[in-house]
Image: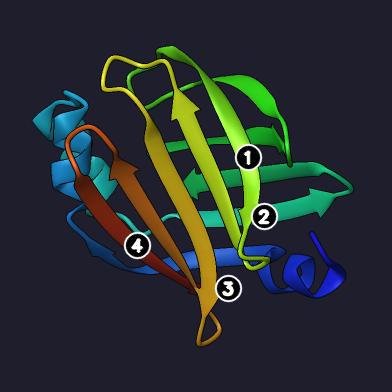
């Protein structure tokens, strides 16, 4: 990841828009109450890059917080939305997108793409086997 791309992504971001995220979570079998908590809040995420290490921390005030660490160009073990252990590949695509591909869960591959457009962080969540796509938009906080 070049230094300009890293500078574009690094920092704190607050969600300002969400589209079809409830449908995405429902496809994972997440119950109605938890989905409503997750979709009615506007989480803040923190992105940090150090060498080939990417850390994305998230906070939903009063609901949940945590972080995931990835190896750019590598694979790590992590828990998906259903707490299944999966392999997560992290790649840089087209020099300006951070792509996480989770493999091995009950729904198959899940692709999460992050890109900066017009100064906003756009996040696309896609369940590949079902072609279910959710989009979220974040502004710097």
Say whether residue 102 is visible.
yes
Q: Secondary structure at mark 3?
A: loop
Q: Which residue is mark 1?
A: 90
Question: How far apart in space, not on screen, are marks 3 and 2 (Cα)?
Answer: 12 Å
Which dot marks residue 126? Answer: none
Q: Residue furthest left?
A: 32
Q: Residue at x 26, y 22 (%)?
A: 107
Q: Secondary structure at mark 1?
A: strand
Q: Which residue is mark 3?
A: 141
Q: Position of residue 77 (x, y in %)?
A: 61, 17
For the residues bearing labels 1 and 3, Cβ distance under 8 angstroms: no
Decide which of 110, 21 is in the foreground and name it.
Answer: 110
Q: Secondary structure at mark 4?
A: strand
Q: Which residue is mark 4?
A: 136
Q: Residues within 10 Å of mark 3 (few under 14, many from 20)?
A: few
- Left or right of residue 140, residue 34 in this image: left
Q: Residue at x 37, y 29 (%)?
A: 109
For the residues bearing labels 4 and 3, Cβ distance under 8 angstroms: no
Q: Secondary structure at mark 2?
A: strand
């Amino acid at each position: 990841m070049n230094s300009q791309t890293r500078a574009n992504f690094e920092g704190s971001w607050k969600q300002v828009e969400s589209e079809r995220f409830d449908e995405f979570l429902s496809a994972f079998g997440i119950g109605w109450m938890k989905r409503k908590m997750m979709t009615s809040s506007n989480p803040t995420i923190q992105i940090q890059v150090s060498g080939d290490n990417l850390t994305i921390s998230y906070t939903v005030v009063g609901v949940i917080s945590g972080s995931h660490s990835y190896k750019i160009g590598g694979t790590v073990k992590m828990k998906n939305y259903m707490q299944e252990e999966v392999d997560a590949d992290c790649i840089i695509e087209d020099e300006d997108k951070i792509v996480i591909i989770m493999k091995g869960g009950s729904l198959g591959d899940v692709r999460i793409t992050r890109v900066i457009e017009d100064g906003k962080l756009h996040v696309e969540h896609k369940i590949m086997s079902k072609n279910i796509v959710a989009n979220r938009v974040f502004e710097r906080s």
